[in-house]
Amino acid sequence: MRMHSLMLALCCAGAVSFAYAGPVEDMTLALNGDQATLVRQLLKKGHDVNQTGGERRETALMEAVRDNASRSFEILLAAPRVQLDTRAGNGDTALMLAAFLARDEMVEKLLEKGAEPNGTGWTALHYAAINGSDSIVTLLLDHAAYIDAEAPNKSTPLMLAARGGHVSTVRLLLLQGADATLKNEIGLTAADYAARAGNHNLALALQGVLAGQPFPDAVQQETPDSAQPPAKSITGAQNTVSPLTSRPSSATPDPAYRQLPAPLLR
């Protein structure tokens, strides 16, 4: 009743344009408009900052990252009982989501607050490498992210950067000690990932690294055959779920890239 009265009063005052539906729904609507004042009021009235909801089962902090609601993000990050490493229904954390969406400032603030960059399976570094986000890769490595982290199919960040044709990211990872000799579960190296994606110049450069040569100062960057990799498969079968989308994919994954992340659905 008290929450209902609060929402009614705020609506009458012009602060929001929606009626009370429930704490999770109200927080989601507040975040969609980055209504920081309302977010603060909901927390004061007892909203559980770590509660998950919606189709993706995300926390309010994750929703703030997704919606780029910077003011609300600051409030939620400062909440006394916020749990930074809570996982959504697809297994992602707020840090992983921020890395995938290239939210540099949010990544930095999450790390400074103590968010964990490492974990079993997919990590924030994988997601930063997929997009070629050098600044986020650097931030994560500066906070002890494991450079050769293995995804469920044993893909490393270096392989994913090579897959995307991100020459500068590949160079950065190599300079920081990434192992170009590692192979995924079907025996592919980063050089193979680059070649299969049509990044032939990058593939040649990585093959040179495997032969003991330094990575060249300049590599002509090519446009990958595919701007986005196939949906990540949990089981390797059809109609599986991509953790970044939390929705089924009917496409049969290329075995070379099985379990690679798909674009986030808005």
Image (cartoon, rainbow, N blue to C red):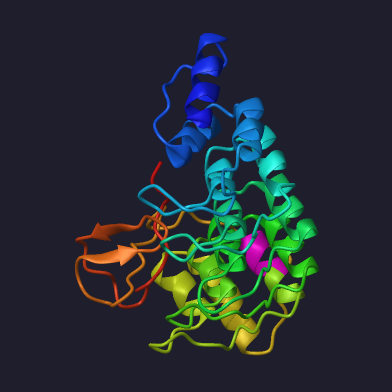
**59 falls in the magenta region:** no
Of residues 32 and 13, the one nearer the viewer is 13
State whether residue 219 appears in this view: no
- In the image, taking residue 208 as reference, residue 108 lies left or right, namely right
Region in magenta: 167-172
Which residue in the rendered view is the most extreme toward the top? 13
The C terminus lies in quadrant: top left
State whether residue 15 appears in this view: yes
Q: Is residue 42 above or below residue 189?
A: above
Kindly identify the residue that appears in the image at 54 percent across and 34 percent down.
31
Q: Is residue 141 above or below residue 265?
A: below
Of residues 108 and 187, the one nearer the viewer is 108
Kindly identify the residue that appears in the image at 77 percent across and 57 percent down.
113
Percent coordinates x, y for residue 239 in the rendering = 20, 65
Percent coordinates x, y for residue 5 in the rendering = 51, 22
The quadrant holding residue 45 is top right
Main secondary structure of the magenta stretch: helix
- In the image, taking residue 115 as reference, residue 126 lies left or right, namely left
Of residues 112 and 249, the one nearer the viewer is 112
- In the image, taking residue 258 as reference, residue 147 lies left or right, namely right
Kindly identify the residue that appears in the image at 39 percent across and 31 percent down.
21
Looking at the rendered structure, the number of numbered marks drawn on it comes to 0
Percent coordinates x, y for residue 134 in the rendering = 69, 57
Kindly identify the residue that appears in the image at 70 percent across and 63 percent down.
115
Which residue in the rendered view is the most extreme toward the front? 1
Q: Is residue 102 above or below residue 92?
A: above
